[in-house]
Amino acid sequence: MDSATSIVNAKVYTGIWVNWSRGPVMGSTLTLTRRDGNLLIAFTAFFIGFIASRAWRIISFALHRYYSTPEARDALHHQRQAVLRNSETPGWSFWTLGQIAWAWRRSPLQSQPGPEHHHNHRRRVLAVVMPTLLASVLCMAAFAIASGFSSQMTTADRGGVEEVLIDGTNCGMVTYTVTRDMAFSKVDLMVTREDSRRRNDAVNYAQQCYDATNKQSQPSDINSGGVFDCNLLARPNLVSQTGSGPQGASINTNAPCPFSKGLCQTGDSSGNLLLDTGYIDSHEHLGLNSHKQDRIAMRQRYHCAPLRTEGFEEDVKDEEDGITYTRYNYGPIIKRAINSTGQEHIEVQNYTLMVRGLDAQYPDPKTRKESTGISESANFLLPVYQSQTINGSVSKASRYVPLPELQRADGSVEVIFLVGNGVGFPDQSVDPWYRVSNVTAGNFYATMRKGSLPYYRPAEAASPLGCVEQFQFCRSSDMECGPLAAWLDAITGAAPLFDLTPEEVVKSDKLKGSSLSSRFIWYTQILNYMSLTASMMPIFPSSSKLSSEDFLERGFQFGLGEAQWQRDVSQWWSTWLSMLQIGFLDTARGPPASFSDYPEQVVIARPADGHMQDMCYNQKVQSRGRHVSFSMFGLCFVFVAGSLIFLVSYLLEPIFAFDWRGRFSFFRLCGGRRASPEQSGFARKGTRNFKNLEWDTTDVLHLQALSFHCKGKGTWAPRSFGIGSEGAGVGSVPVTTEPGEVFEPLITSCRRADGSHAGHSADPDLMGSGFKSGSEKGSINKVDVVEVVDIEAQTHTEHAAKGGLAKNMGFVAQVPRRQETGFSLSTVATGSTYIQGGDKDEQDEKRVLPVAQCRT
């Protein structure tokens, strides 16, 4: 696995989890693969569209009941009622109501004088149609927006980045055991390769994702041209200039000296570098998804300054090889070894570093084979010495013991030497760590060019840089913190905050089982595993230790600035922070499977209890395009609310019809038996039962059955599938009761007296829809109503038809106050709308019953 993809290739958990950044309710999250997520988005959009039709059903039912009345109304009113009853979608209602409004846009009374009448007619049309039309438009718009926002139920940010969890099934850390009698094996190479991979990842990630931010790039530019996705981790970096970094993070390039007076090359009060991470929250910045009471905050400070060399160096000539060496004494080195008898042998080296002198590092060009005197492979050397501080003093186990004036009770001290090692400098530099002098070391030439330019060498054989590293741990819930101190002192000092004693947190072999204590132990073990408690410098690979090496070419160092050393230290710090971020991801992902083949040499430390395991399963990263995370609150809201709308839309009609169903039957009136007021319940229930009856009888199937029935076509009866077992009403479908009944469609039975089909003519001599005249069964020429039906009282009505009544049938389609001679229904063609017409003197007296009735 190459370093460019090792961070990215992490198995992601798919399922339901809680993103504690949003709380237990709003943070409930469902993570799916991109394919499954797209299917869910598509299904949700379809579901919302379906629920839109059911919501419109509720709205149309309410509007139908609101407008329903037993009083006589014009045809426009009844057309609107028919649309409301039979519309399934707001789009269909909008289109049909638009057709109705367009058909009625002009007054049917063309001979009515003056514009006032036509203006009043248009207002009447708009008053009837527009409210329902607007309701359909609002319903369509609302659910169109809801359908569009169905894709916004994902938790992705504007860049399409989703927060997901690493699958922590293989969570663990490799503990490599080496003994003196153990032979070198393939396992050594495996461990070395894994360490190198992790370090290279950190270096490359820092160069791409930290340097871009330090140069004030926009967040969208951070990934430009890089091999890593800087948006993979919980935060692109921990020193963001955009305000998303840790609280209290700072970079002070003009800090005071961290050591005793007179030791710093740049002065005691200014010119030094102080890097402070601020409080890095385990949840917000490292991606350890957890409730606020289980979070841990860590702070790290790195305070550095170039050191003076006067009084701390001496030249020593080796008599054997004649080379002059330079010794630097910033504290002794304690060398410990185990002899063959198993006893520890201690040797004290009374200086810190000894290197070849400047003359040995930069010999006379005449004595070198290279024409310039500089080796093309020349590179810097960076020896590092770090002390260990415990209980405010240097530990006895520390290999390096700083001088008293360098020691710090509240931190660990390290000294990093920069050795020129033959690297030439084309330009002089006042940088206090590189210290390029004005002494010419030789000249370099350009091939096939005349002339030469001088190059320079450092002023010191080795230039020391002193740094102090400090840590601090806090309980994030209340930000109560332990001391700002060296690593072990910081841990033991913060132990009581996490329900631990100093001994328990160091040994970590006896767990109390509390969530916070287990999490703190696992947290510190990860830091130890990633070597983040040691000096920053040894964690780096041999290359890219200095940012200046980007301009190191053929042994010559170009491009040094006045504060190059601060850029170098900032790069170490950025790499350390990168490794901190990657370390938790690596632990959750677990070691390569190949390590399990060597159980005797490799021990994989697994989580010791459920709280540690919970940390492994709650490592957040970010995924771009490979996974989709949905808000469970949004999904539940959509599907629960939609399901309620679905149920209400289907239960609303039976609920309103429950107290009248079976008492009053449309087919009892049309089927040959008269329903008395006591049977029907109409007299007692009044208008409410009328609203139910009108809703049922204006259904398209009932209207069709009524049309056939009142023409004497078929013997009809309701077949119930809703509440109750018989009778018409909600949940019934009209069916014929006689086997083998066949009859022509309505359109073929609507003919004029001459046998031709009724078309778009509005001939006032035609009756009905151009029904064939005569005394045939079901045909009616002209109707004269002796007494108007009183729906409320359900009184009897006597009918007389001058053209003869159908056998056992009476059809009251219209209730004029005198004989009709000019009523017609114009156009039967598809896409047309029936409008009411008639003679000028009779128009205002015409009314249409809300419900047509057939009676014996």
Image (tube, rainbow, N blue to C red):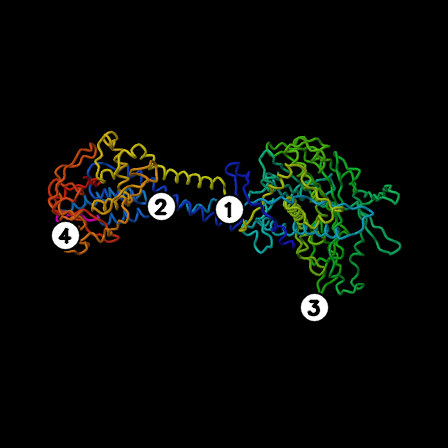
Which numbered mark, 2 or 4, is in the foreground of this view?
4
Q: Which residue is mark 2?
A: 140
Residues rendered magenta in the picture = 104-113
Q: Residue at x 62, y 31 (%)?
A: 480
Residue type at mark 2 is: Met
- Which amino acid lies under the numbered mark 4 shown in the image of this protein? Asp
In depth, the one of 242 and 228 nearer the eye is: 228
Residue drawn at (35%, 43%) of the image: 139
Q: Which mark is residue 763?
A: 4
Task: Say if mark 3 contacts mark 4, CB within 8 Å.
Answer: no
Residue 559: % across, % down: 66, 56
Residue of label 3: 447
**Element type where label 2 sits in the image:** helix
Foreground of the two, 81 or 176: 81
**Residue 493 position within the rendered picture, expressed as x and y whole percent measured from the top left:** 69, 32
Q: Nearer the viewer, mark 1 or mark 4?
A: 4
Q: Which of disc 2 and disc 1 is earlier in sequence? A: 2
* Residue 105 is a magenta residue: yes
Q: Which residue is mark 1?
A: 157
Q: Toward which corner of the image does residue 371 lie, by quadrant?
A: bottom right
Determine whether the residue tagged by mark 1 lies in a helix, strand or loop. loop
Instruction: Please identify the quarter of the rendering in which residue 851 is found.
Output: top left
Verify CB contact (< 8 Å) between mark 1 and mark 2.
Answer: no
Going from N to C along the chain, the mark reached first, 3 or 4, is: 3
Neighbours of disc 3 within 10 Å: few (<14), some (14-19), many (20+) = few
Q: Nearer the viewer, mark 3 or mark 4?
A: 4
Q: CA–CA distance between discs 3 and 4?
A: 109 Å
